[in-house]
Image (spheres, helix red, strand yellow):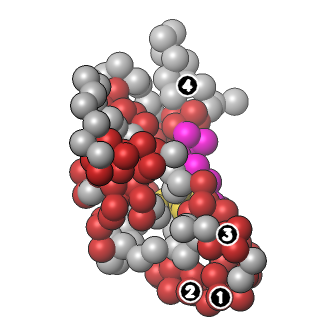
Amino acid sequence: MFYATLEGLRRFNIPHKFEFISVVSLYAQLIREGRLKVDPSWNKEGLKFTCQDPCKLVRQGLGDKVAEDLRFVIKAVAGPENFVDTWPRLSNNYCCGGGGGALQAGFVANRRRFGKIKFDQLAATGADVVITPCHNCHTQILDICEFYGGNWKTTHLWNWLEKALVLDGGDQKGKD
């Protein structure tokens, strides 16, 4: 829906009086401004994180800026020393193989075969957690991890943002 709206505004030159940004960039902006306070100290195990740059959000959507915002937020919530980037990265990152209707098309073997490139890329990071803000990427990366025997957890960004969230009283939401 994000990309469809963005592309509709672009393609049909629809006048609008609002800035169209991703929730990822909004999180980054709020953290930078200090309006959303996060603390990575919950990550006592030193979990290593990497991310998937979704095609519609990054390559065909808002470009490297939103991909950099994604990395900024992950580093803010998990600790910069706990982030391991993929190669290639940003707009040059590999597609997961789950978008464009591939998850719903029924050609599971083809989707997984294409996804092996992404699996190998993610496995090479050694990350414990792969974060993606895209539902299709999430489902595809979860599937290829299980199918090819990966060892990471696939999650959405907000799962970890919630763990690192510092409430007004100074308490950290994710602490027990």
Q: Earlier in the sequence, mark 2 or mark 4?
A: 2
Q: Position of residue 173 (x, y in %)?
A: 60, 25
Closer to the observer: label 3 or label 4?
A: 3
Q: Is residue 119 left or right of residue 107?
A: left
Closer to the observer: label 3 or label 2?
A: 3
Query: What residue range appears in magenta?
Result: 151-160
Residue kind at label 3, given as amino acid type: Leu
Residue that badge 4 annotates: 172
Tell me which residue sits at (63%, 82%) in the image.
111
Pick the residue in front: 146 or 169: 146
Residue that badge 1 annotates: 110
Q: Position of residue 108 (x, y in %)?
A: 72, 82
**Quadrant where the image shows the C terminus:** top right
Residue that badge 2 annotates: 114
Pointer 2 and pointer 1: residues touching (CB < 8 Å)?
Answer: yes
In the figure, residue 130 lies in which quadrant? Answer: bottom right
User: Would you call the spot at circle 3 few (<14 residues within 10 Å), some (14-19), or many (20 or more)?
Assistant: some
Q: Position of residue 117 (x, y in %)?
A: 50, 86
